Amino acid sequence: MMELLFEGLIKAFEMIISGDPEIVEITLRTLRVSMTAILVSTLLGLPAGMLLGLARFPGRKLILVLINIGMGLPPVVAGLWITIFLWRSGPLGDLSLLYTPAAIVIAQTLVSLPIVTGLTATAFQQIDEKMILQIKALGATRWQLVWILMKEARLAILAAIIAGFGRVVAEVGAAMMVGGNISGETRILTTSIVMEVSKGNFDIALALSFIIMAIAFLITFCLTFLQQRKRPE
Amino acid sequence: MKKRSFITIILILVLALMTACSNSKTSNAKEEDSANSIGSGKKADLILATTTSTQDSGLLDVLIPVFEKETDYNVKTVAVGTGQALEMGSRGEADVLLVHAPEAEEKIVESGDAINRQKVMFNDFIIAGPAEDPAGIKGSTAGEALTSILDSGAVFVSRGDNSGTHKKELELWKGENLDPKQHKAYIETGQGMGSSLQIAAEKKGYILTDRATYLAQRDSLAGYEILVEDDESLLNIYHVMQVNPGKHERVNKEGAKAFVDFMLKKETKETISQFGKDEYGEPLFFLFE
């Protein structure tokens, strides 16, 4: 087994150093798709989570419950539903999105959005109401208030994004279903690992697993670095 | 200074958005360029629903680029079990099908969902198993082999996924009037041929597999060998067919027709009959002539 791991590691280095065009392409596509998905999730989930955490309106608790359920939404379920909606015979068939990277982005956004929204909402709920009153009393405008509170919840917001990114980059079931693992179009690292395993190419699969782990590590490292950065006084 | 770190985060997010967008733009531009160079606008997509065996054996990796070069279509190969491929066809979700389950194919032609069904190639199924051969099936016919496997209580791994291979397996059991599901050592994986082979080898069980996938994976299946072959009942025939544009209006009719014609062309047949000779010492698919 150690031999196989070692072979995989060597193969991974070979692939990266030789710049195997297919691997480069798959890696870049994975990055592009995951980044877009987590970005959309952040852009939608951050304001939504903030609203849910700070505002009080009827139905708010119900929405929070639904979001918490959504955090556990199995990706294959999301994939199945999106597939049915995107079918040529389905309600969104005119868009011809099935088996495109956009479909994968939709699936990954769907599974990461509840995580980003839910964790952001929790972060803002924890902010002391007295502090909000104080800021208001000091004459802050609405946007200034939002800005100050966002800074206050910075750590938790980044934790939400990190958790969402973890979900996105690990996702395989939905990407397989809505993307189809089409060579040169929708093949991403996770789906190619599944395919190489089913082909019996364990060394390539292992090499790809090292690449995807490196990506996950690098990005999570950067985000954590930002999160934990000491504030110079 | 808090402000600065927060601005950094936002900058990074914006940057990520920009790269995400610009990358997709450049790749689109590239696609358009290559399409333009052939002399038409954007390449039309052609969805090919096919079996895992044609993809896992590597045959499509050789054929599809040639087809894409010769025509103006961008092929989206969706490799699934034959059952799912046929279902995609009858829903109009695919344009052209390359599958291997003659009985089920006839049904979809009868129902009018598929037209222009043509024989492409064949190879054969084999029964593979551990070299020790606990059920002693080596050299027997397929029917005898299945009976001995059940009697000996040895593990048999079934695809169990409605694929062409699975349909073939059920047909063989039925031919012997056997019901394998009653037996504890009958395992259904519900996965593709490649994964099922890996499971069978790991469990030291017998399995019905197409020869192409077996040969392509032989190296990773230690202590595993072909035990039953060259049996007439083990013939594996591949057909190509168009999804009926008269019944499913969104189907890419011209592309599907072009693909069927391509599969029947002399040059393609030559490629198919040579495929695998270099790597495995024997061809993986055979022609009907």
Image (cartoon, coloured by chain):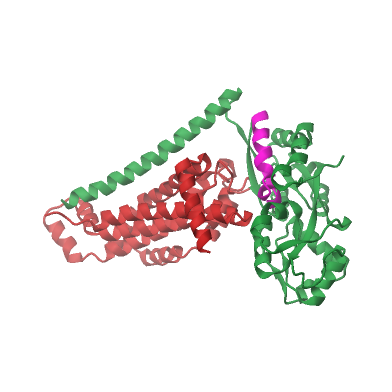
Residue at image position (17%, 55%) is: A231
Residue B148 forms part of the magenta stretch: no
Q: Is residue B40 left or right of residue B240?
A: left
Q: Residue at x 53, y 32 (%)?
A: B31
Q: Which residue lies most toward the front here?
A: A3
Residue at image location 77% in from the left, 51% down from the top: B100
Shown in green, the chain is: B
* B186 relative to B1 in the view: left or right: right
Is there any visible trace of residue B87 in the rendered image? Answer: no
User: In the image, is B68 to the left or to the right of B131?
Assistant: left
Q: Is residue B202 above or below residue B113?
A: below
Q: Which residues are magenta?
A: B47-71
The red-coloured chain is labelled A
Q: Is residue B66 magenta?
A: yes
Q: Is residue A100 above or below residue A156?
A: above
Quadrant of the image occupied by residue B170:
bottom right
